[in-house]
Amino acid sequence: DKLSIAMHVREGGGYDINGFAHFPVKFPPLSFYVEDLKAVLERFPKEPVFCYLFTDALDPEGLVLNILKELPDAKNIEFAYRKQINIHDANVLEDFFSLFEFDVLIRPDSNFSIVPSLIHDYKMIYAAEDFDSKTGKIVAYLELNP
């Protein structure tokens, strides 16, 4: 009964703390996810939304709060995330197969979410594709399925 969005947010989880410096498309900044989420919301303006964060972040609630600060009108969005045992190497298989249950995927350049994007028919996929060193921004790839 809601548009479901899977958002794979890699942060390093205390394990890979220098990820963005070495692999910016594998560890996009939060602004990448916010911009893509806004684009999805613009495409589906009247639909209620369920957005689940698949993340290795040590503070997923903080991520959600920071995302909400950037959304002008978030009353139709319900956010969820793993609240316990959220570390980089736990729940990997459960999370991987759960990615197939969503309508939209917003993902970094990570094999964990690349594979589902190749074999599941999402309505939309936003993916980190390249890093523009001149602007310091992630270049996103968009795929639409009717």
Image: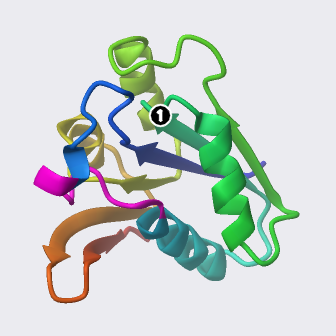
Q: Please, is residue 136 above or below residue 37 in the view?
A: below
Residue found at x 29% / y 74%:
140
Q: Which residues are magenta?
A: 21-30
- Which residue sits furthest right? 75
Q: Quadrant of residue 90?
A: top left
In the figure, is residue 80 to the left or right of 92?
A: right
State the quadrant of the C terminus.
Answer: bottom left
Image colouring: rainbow
- Could you say which is closer to the camera, residue 138 or residue 120? 138
The amino acid type, in three-letter code, at marker 1 is Ala
The percent coordinates of residue 5 (x first, y second) are 57, 51
Residue found at x 25% / y 42%:
119
List the residue tagged with mark 1. 57
Magenta highlight on residue 29: yes
Residue 63 visible here:
yes
Residue found at x 25% / y 79%:
136
